[in-house]
Image: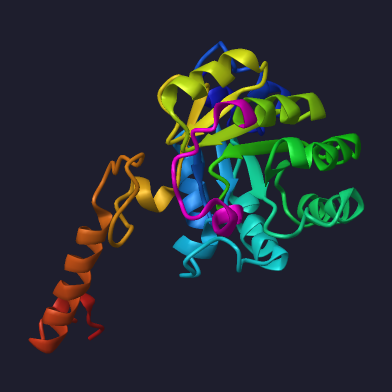
Amino acid sequence: MSSHSHTQRRLTVPEFSGMKGQRKITMLTAYDYPTAELIDQSGVDGILVGDSLSMVVQGHDNTLPVTLDEMIYHAEMVGRAVRHALVVVDMPFPSYHMGPYKAIQNAGRILKQTRCQAVKLEGGVEQAEVIAALVGAGIPVMAHVGLRPQSVHQLGGYRVQRDEEPLIKDAEAAESAGAFSVVLECIPATLAQKITQRVKIPTIGIGAGVDCDGQILVIQDLLGLTAGRVPKHVRAYAQLRQTMESAVKAFSDDVRASNFPGPAETFE
């Protein structure tokens, strides 16, 4: 299906799920209108308003501080920009940890107050009841197993998750509960391949090898905007940080040398 056939309408959850086995799915994160608009124009299948915004936008050192109100604020901007992609919003910690009733209330706010179509939450077996309740309320859910950044303290840091049996059980529990897709984060490629074959819903990998049904990256990582070390599983497709630094420096140099504004930028 060409990206043009959807220019006037959003990809639906069933269409997204139906891509499994047909072609690879592409997903990226976005947190604001201009970035979401650009990503959407480029024909990406899915856009995640990730709670990673806690780190890459707000400057925290993990995803725990971001609030539901802040997620909605960013999701609203992203949703307004997108014409084609399926837009998924992360439920932040602990917006779905207080039982199904609270989870429906919070996810319901996301769907009511933004133009986004689905929510994502971390966990498999222990969140199956919540996933089922959300789906039962008509709220599509993308699950997330493997490295779960909201459990960073419990997991002892950001490290590859290798415990095969629990990870398979998590993915299968999410599928049984009605999730339409599952993110596999930082797990060995062979295990990700096994899970991808075992479940009928698409797996979206990040640090989970090439055999997942799709791939997602954080947009700042893809564009080379991230300061310092990037994770092993990231490929930077540009080096925008250097570009931006040299532009800012050139501006400062020009101002200090009275080269900006010049005749072209001046009103006579």
Residue 45 sits in which quadrant? top right
The residue located at (64%, 42%) in the rendering is 87
The residue located at (30%, 62%) in the rendering is 227
The residue located at (35%, 47%) in the rendering is 231
Q: Is residue 156 covered in magenta?
A: yes
Position in image of residue 116 (x %, y %): 70, 46
For the question of whether residue 130 can be seen, the reply is yes
Instruction: Establish if 54 lies above or below 122.
Output: below
The number of numbered badges drawn on the structure is 0
Residue 240 sits in which quadrant? bottom left
Q: Is residue 147 left or right of residue 123?
A: left
The residue located at (41%, 26%) in the rendering is 209
- In which quadrant will I find the N terminus? top right
Q: Is residue 147 left or right of residue 258?
A: right
Q: Is residue 18 left or right of residue 258?
A: right
Magenta-highlighted residues: 150-166
Position in image of residue 76 (x %, y %): 67, 57
For the question of whether residue 25 can be seen, the reply is no
Position in image of residue 79 (x %, y %): 65, 50
Position in image of residue 182 (x %, y %): 63, 31
Front position in the image: 69 or 249: 69
- In which quadrant will I find the C terminus? bottom left
